[in-house]
Structures are given as C-alpha cells and as structure tokens.
Image (cartoon, rainbow, N blue to C red):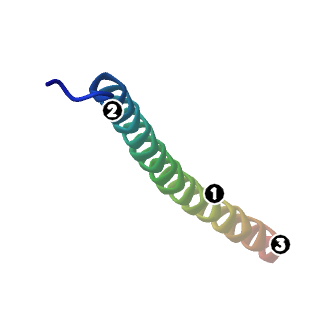
C-alpha cells in the first residue's frame, strides 16, 4: 500500500529547501553589503583625513 500524503510531504520538503536557500542567500548578501560598507567607510575616513591634513598645511602656510 502506498503512503498517503507523500506528494504533500515532497512539496513541503521542496518548499523548505527553497526557503533555506533564500535565507542563506539573504545572509550572504547582508554579509557582503556589510563588508562593502566597511570598505567604503574606511576609504571615506582616509579621504577626510587627507583633506584635514591639506587644510592644516594650508592654514599653516598663511
């Protein structure tokens, strides 16, 4: 005798696999965004430091 509900269980398992894959991708995307944000923040901080140095040298030359 065949199991009752097997097609439904298969659909549930496939849906669960899709949900897990989407969650993993979202976590990866969030991590990648966080790394890009940190890199951009560092570059902006470096640029601001360079501008501060230029302003200080200019003020000292006046």
Mark 2 or mark 3, whichever is nearer to me = 2
Residue beneath disc 3? 59
What is the secondary structure assignment of the residue under circle 1? Answer: helix
Q: Crowding near pointer 1: few (<14 within 10 Å), some, many (20+)?
A: few
C-alpha distance separating marks 1 and 2: 52 Å
Q: Crowding near pointer 2: few (<14 within 10 Å), some, many (20+)?
A: few
Residue 51 in picture, x, y percent from top left: 70, 61
Query: In the picture shown, does residue 50 fall above or below 13?
Result: below
Residue 23 in picture, x, y percent from top left: 45, 44
Mark 3 or mark 1, whichever is nearer to me = 1
Please name whichever residue, 26 or 60, is drawn nearer the observer in this view of the structure. 26
- The tag earlier along the polypeptide, 1 or 2, is 2
Residue beneath disc 2? 9
C-alpha distance separating marks 2 and 3: 74 Å
Please name whichever residue, 47 or 16, is drawn nearer the observer in this view of the structure. 16
* 5 left or right of 36 in image: left
- The tag earlier along the polypeptide, 3 or 1, is 1
Residue 44 tag number? 1
């Amino acid at each position: 005798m065949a199991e009752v509900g097997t097609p439904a269980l298969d659909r549930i398992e496939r849906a669960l696999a899709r949900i897990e894959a989407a969650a993993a991708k979202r976590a990866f995307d969030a991590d990648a965004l966080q790394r890009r944000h940190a890199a951009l923040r560092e570059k902006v901080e470096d640029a601001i430091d360079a501008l501060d140095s230029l302003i200080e040298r200019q003020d000292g030359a006046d």
